[in-house]
Image (spheres, helix red, strand yellow):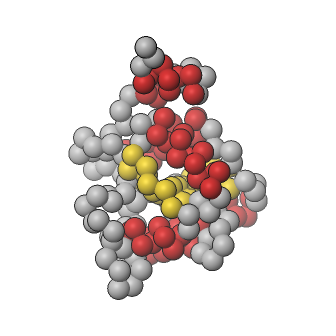
Amino acid sequence: MVNKSTRIQKLKGGLPTEALAKVESGDGSRIHVLAVDDNSVDRKFIEKLLKISCYKVTTVDSASRALEILGLIEGTPPLAPNAFKINLIITDYCMPGMTGYDLLKTVKECSSLKEIPVVIMSSENVPNRIKTCLAEGAEEFLLKPVQIADVKRLEGHVRDRKP
C-alpha cells in the first residue's frame, strides 16, 4: 500500500521531507493561501504546488472574486468570515478586468488587510512591472512557471509578519 507521503514524493519527484512538514501559521493552523489566476491550468498548477507543500488553499479565477472573499466588495460581507482567514495572497499579474497589481493596491489600501502578504506572479519578465509591484508592497514577484523552491519561500513571508 502506498501512503500519502510516498504519493506526494512521486508527484514531485522526491520532494524533500522538510517540505512535507505541516506548514502552520502562528495559531497552529495551516497557512491559508488565496490563489488568484484567470487561467484554469495555471490555477490548478499553483493549487497543486501549494497543497503538496501542505498549505490550505482557496482558488479563485479573478481579482474581483478575491475581493468578495476578502469582504472588499461594497455591501458584501466576507464569505464565511472565520473560514476565510487568509494568511497570504498569490495572484497572477495579467487578468481581464482587474489585474493582480490592482488587487495588490486594493489590499494594501485596506487597513484591516494591508498586513496580508501579497505575492505577484507572471509569465512576463518586465523589469518596470516587477519594480512597480514591489514598490507598491508586493512581498515578491515570481516568474511562471512557479517552482517548488518558490513555494518554499512563501512561508517566510507569513512568518516574517508574526509579532
| Residue 92 visible within the image | no
Which residue lies at the image location 38% right of the left edge and 50% below the top edge? 32
Extreme bottom residue here?
A: 75
Residue 16 screen position, x and y as percent: 51, 22
Quarter of the view holding residue 111? bottom left
Residue 6 screen position, x and y as percent: 48, 19
In this rendering, is residue 99 above or below 89? below
Give the total number of marks visible in the rendering. 0
Which residue lies at the image location 31% right of the left edge and 76% below the top edge? 77
In this rendering, is residue 82 above or below 105? above
In this rendering, is residue 51 above or below 85? above
In this rendering, is residue 105 above or below 32? below
Extreme top residue here?
A: 1
Closer to the camera in the image, 25 or 63: 63
Residue 115 screen position, x and y as percent: 38, 62
| Residue 115 visible within the image | yes
Which residue lies at the image location 47% right of the left edge and 35% below the top edge? 53
Q: Quadrant of the N terminus?
A: top left
Extreme front residue here?
A: 1
Quarter of the view holding residue 101? bottom right
Residue 17 relative to residue 41: left or right? left
Closer to the camera in the image, 41 or 73: 41
Residue 101 relative to residue 115: left or right? right
Which residue lies at the image location 66% right of the left edge and 73% below the top edge? 96
